[in-house]
Image (cartoon, helix red, strand yellow):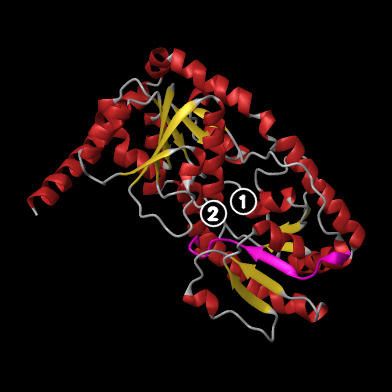
Amino acid sequence: MKQLVIIGTVWPEPNSTAAGSRMLQLISLFQKQEYNITFLCSASLSDFSYDLSQLSIATQTIQLNDSSFNTIISDLNPNVVLFDRFMIEEQYGWRVMEHCPNALRILDTEDLHFLRKAREVAFKQNRELIFEDYLSDVFKRELASIYRCDLTLLISEYEMELAIQTFKIDTSLLYYLPFLSEQTNEKVPNFNERKHFISIGNFLHEPNWQTVLQLKQFWKSIKKELPEAELHVYGAYVTEKAKQLHNEKEGFLIKGRAESVAEVYAKSRVLIAPIPYGAGLKGKLFEAMQLGLPSITTSVGAEGMNGNLDWNGFISINENDFINKAILLYTDEEKWKNAQLNGYQIIEKRFKKTLFESDFIAKINELQHNLKSHRNKNFLGQILQHQSLQSTKYMSKWIEAKNNKA
């Protein structure tokens, strides 16, 4: 049986983060091709970590900067190794190359971290993004990781275009694989059976926190026009500063973790997400479309999602526009129904699992059969393997020796 090893940044939490859901989607793709999967991770399990044994996936805790990993990966002898974000490839990539040189190495970016970082810098300096914002330390590390791997998965068409057009990364090293939907449209509550606004997002993720701050700023104007409406803000890992925003009188309610996203979405009339910066695809908006909940967001929020199709509600251009569109979508039943249908169309035409799974597996099989020639063409990757990882390798060995001595 074919062997896949996934090295995770954290143990998947599909009910807490879009990244957790994404990981389970990738696992499903490989299991359908009869891969035996082992998930390795150095992080601690949380109360909300997904029980991977339910999917017949073996799990093992690994140590940072410890040669015990060498034995583990050698014994598993995988055909494919999937790195969960570039930081994991930095930490373990050189060990995989040394002990399993014939394993296909795949990097799942989740989103381009350097893009999110560049946008954060521009946002916090209250200015437009410029090219030099991209060129951070994160940019150099992430691109080096992309070149060292045999294939990198990008979740957004925008990020594919940025990588190819702006940074001239060879298309043979990249693969577009967005969120995948298997869901059929089930009956959901209608317009009149719903009330209140909703927002959702892991509070530890900085763009989500900034979105909550934007909502706090916008909410009074919305509440003035819709005095009976409330805003329910859900998200895992609520911080103390977030709790301080809770205000019953204003109808601005910090609800914390949602036990079931489907249930809280079904009760709500409109999702509002004035996302100021970020990267990748937004899981909250993807799930809203799947579950028949219209939304209002920004151009960054909608980026890479709807293509040339109409949005699942409105994409705002500024604060006043956002407030006006939120009121309109909440009160106009016809526009709400059309928005819901638009969301279903986006899912059906752009994210249905059957649109991607066969081509993805074909790409994996092709690379495995032509791995040597594929790597020979990626000469920059070979240079980076020779040079860049040596510092990571010997720093790791130094830390291990220091730990052993202690």
- Quick check: 304 left or right of 397? right
Do we see residue 389 in this rendering? yes
In the image, is residue 172 part of the stretch drawn in magenta? no
**Residue indicated by mark 1:** 283
Question: Where is residue 13 shown, x and y percent of the image?
Answer: 50, 52
For mark 1, give the secondary structure.
helix
Question: Where is residue 75 shown, x and y percent of the image?
Answer: 28, 28
* Amino acid marked by disc 1: Gly
For mark 2, give the secondary structure.
loop
For the C terminus, the quadrant is bottom left
Image quadrant in which you'd find residue 375 = top left
Q: What residue is rendered at 77% in x and 49% in y?
A: 311
> Compared to 258, does 144 lie above or below?
above
Do we see residue 385 in this rendering? no
Question: Where is residue 322 shown, x and y percent of the image?
Answer: 74, 65
**Residue indicated by mark 2:** 17
Q: Which residues are magenta?
A: 192-205
In the image, is residue 197 part of the stretch drawn in magenta? yes
Q: CA distance from mark 1 to mark 2?
A: 8 Å
* Amino acid marked by disc 2: Thr
For the N terminus, the quadrant is top left
